[in-house]
Amino acid sequence: MTTYGLIGKNIDYSFSKSYFNTKFNNEAIKAKYINYDIEDIKEIKQIVNNSIELAGLNVTIPYKEAVIPYLDEIDSQAERIGAVNTIKIENKKMIGYNTDVFGFTKSVFSLIAPNHDSALILGTGGAAKAIRHALVSMGYQINFVSRDKEKGDFTYDELNAEIIKNHQLIVNCTPLGTHPDVNQFPPIPYEFVDKTHLLYDLIYNPSITSFLAQGRENGAQIINGEQMLIAQAEKAWEIWNGQ
């Protein structure tokens, strides 16, 4: 049976396995989707070599960047982004793509307001790189926020009323708040968030994270990552099937 799967670490919570297996069942597709929860990205070679019917993989935290050296080819957009979340496998040859840009753009486009022209991206990992690429393509001015001054434009301690006011879109690309650690959240000054802001959390479980809840309490519009995941999953399916 044709097999697809997810490469990641601590991925019991994953949306992808449930989504694709439901899709296969509903559409009478003879395929299965399984999780590959691995401790080291180098294990991907063994997985591909030992799985005769493996046709495609999704890649999630913490391997979106680390997987690149193990690929045989990489799509030009994914190479520019510097992160891969989808792999097509042909005769054990791995070709890397990024569907996060497509998924994010599709999910957020209708929510963009005229006053939204600058964004804070919380985090600097592979997902953050894809979101940056998407937002720059949409004409946004971007600033990264990181705990490490060398990785971001601002540290969390540097965020103040003026910075928050001048960035109407705030995107959480960190894992803070993911189930089961639902009480965690990025340490931004939420008291300066108001109704002019849109807070976007790539996390989808829980549906309302502490990050989103605090934004909503201050009047901000909020959206979680579920629609992005659905869109990028369908784009991955197209890639795997040459559509």
Image: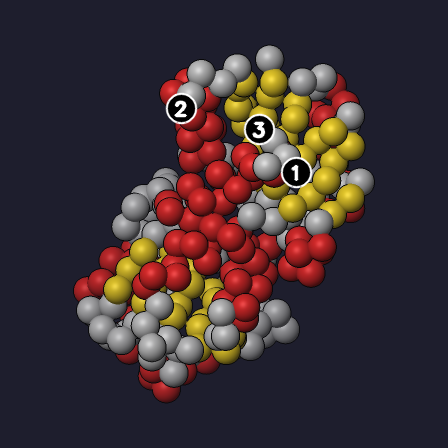
Residue positioned 59% across, 37% down in the render: 243
Between label 3 and label 2, give the one nearer the viewer. Answer: 2
Please name the amino acid that badge 2 sits on: Thr
Q: Position of residue 66 (x, y in %)?
A: 69, 47
The residue pinned by badge 1 equals 87
Q: Quadrant of residue 215?
A: bottom left
Q: Position of residue 125 (x, y in %)?
A: 58, 57
Residue positioned 32% across, 56% down in the render: 223
Give the number of the disc on residue 22. Answer: 2
Residue found farthest to the front: 243
Q: Position of residue 85 (x, y in %)?
A: 60, 44
Secondary element at tag 1: strand
Number of residues whose C-alpha sits closer than 10 Å to that of mark 2, classed few (under 14), some (14–19) or many (20 or more):
some
Q: Quadrant of residue 4?
A: top right
Q: Nearer the viewer, residue 54 or 122?
A: 54
Kindly check if marks 3 and 2 are in contact, taking CB atoms under 8 A apart as contact. no
Please name the amino acid that badge 3 sits on: Gly
Q: Earlier in the sequence, mark 2 or mark 1?
A: 2
- Mark 3–mark 2 Cα distance, whole angstroms, equals 14 Å
